[in-house]
Amino acid sequence: MPYQEKKFNLPELNGISKESVDAHLGLYAGYVKNFNAISGMLAEYAKDSEKNAHALAELIRRRSFEFGGMRLHELYFAQFEGSSTALTASGTLAKQIEAEYHKLEYFLAMFRAIALMRGPGWAILYWDPQAKQLLTGFSGEQHQGHFATLPIILALDVWEHAYLLDYGAAGKDKYIDAFFKNLNWPVLEQRFAGSTA
Ligand SMILES: [Fe+2]
């Protein structure tokens, strides 16, 4: 069954232009389209898997790239829906961050350092329900380096396409500031509540 492109009810963002958001939504649509396209090709190529071995292998590898691009962008844009709202100080996510990082600002400093890593990818905050702890990580491209099976609480796109229009190739740090200015933390709190239930 083909995957459907999601629509987001986005407010006007502070420091991330509508032009940039519209271009970025277009890229997101491309991930959905290409995931569906590759999925459609697999059965055909598998009919002669010996002759198509190299093509099939590449399609299988790239399909998870497209899937990661699809799902991560859905997490990303949903974080701006509603309006910019601070983390609820008395909430369970704030308490977990405090327990592990002592202060929100220490967590943010760590997360920012990850987001500033070189190369295209995503800074991601995961929740490990087995160990009952948060894990921060960096996924290269869209699909590599994930903590397998862990739910994602926060996803920050740090591919150049996320900030090039507004800040230029050297403007990743300014874009990260803008991202956090627009973040609707209760969306993350809901994800966390869903993952800990
Ligand atoms: Fe992106």
Image (cartoon, rainbow, N blue to C red):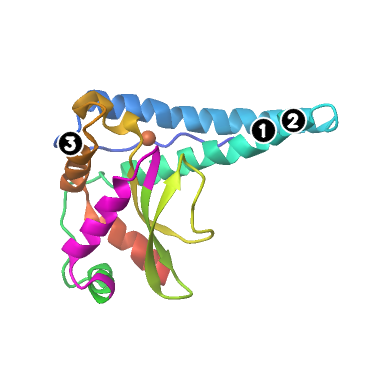
Residue 22 occupies which quadrant of the picture? Answer: top left
The residue carrying mark 2 is 54
Residue 191 occupies which quadrant of the picture? Answer: bottom left
Contact between labelled residues 1 and 3, with CB atoms less than 8 Å apart: no
- Give the alpha-carbon distance from disc 3 to disc 1, as whole Å: 38 Å
Kindly report which numbered mark, 3 or 2, lies closer to the viewer in this rendering.
Answer: 2
Instruction: Indicate the secondary structure of the residue bearing disc 3.
Output: loop
The answer to whether residue 191 is visible is: yes
Percent x, y of residue 54: 74, 30
The residue carrying mark 1 is 58
- Give the alpha-carbon distance from disc 1 to disc 2, as whole Å: 6 Å
Residue 94 occupies which quadrant of the picture? Answer: bottom left
Apparent side of residue 82 relative to residue 56 in the rendered image (left or right): left
- Give the alpha-carbon distance from disc 3 to disc 2, as whole Å: 44 Å
Q: Which residues lie in the magenta part?
A: 100-122
Contact between labelled residues 2 and 1, with CB atoms less than 8 Å apart: yes
Q: In which quarter of the image is ligand 1?
A: top left
Give the residue at x 41% y 75%.
132
Residue 101 part of the magenta segment: yes
Apparent side of residue 193 relative to residue 70 in the rendered image (left or right): left
Residue 128 higher or lower than 144, as above or below: below
The residue carrying mark 3 is 13
Kindly report which numbered mark, 3 or 1, lies closer to the viewer in this rendering.
Answer: 1
Apparent side of residue 62 relative to residue 177 in the rendered image (left or right): right
Magenta: main secondary structure: helix
Residue 135 higher or lower than 180, as above or below: below
The amino acid type, in three-letter code, at marker 3 is: Leu
* Number of other residues with Cα within 10 Å of mark 1, as a class: few under 14, some 14 to 19, many 20 or more: few
Percent x, y of residue 61: 63, 38
Disc 1 residue: CB within 8 Å of ligand 1 = no
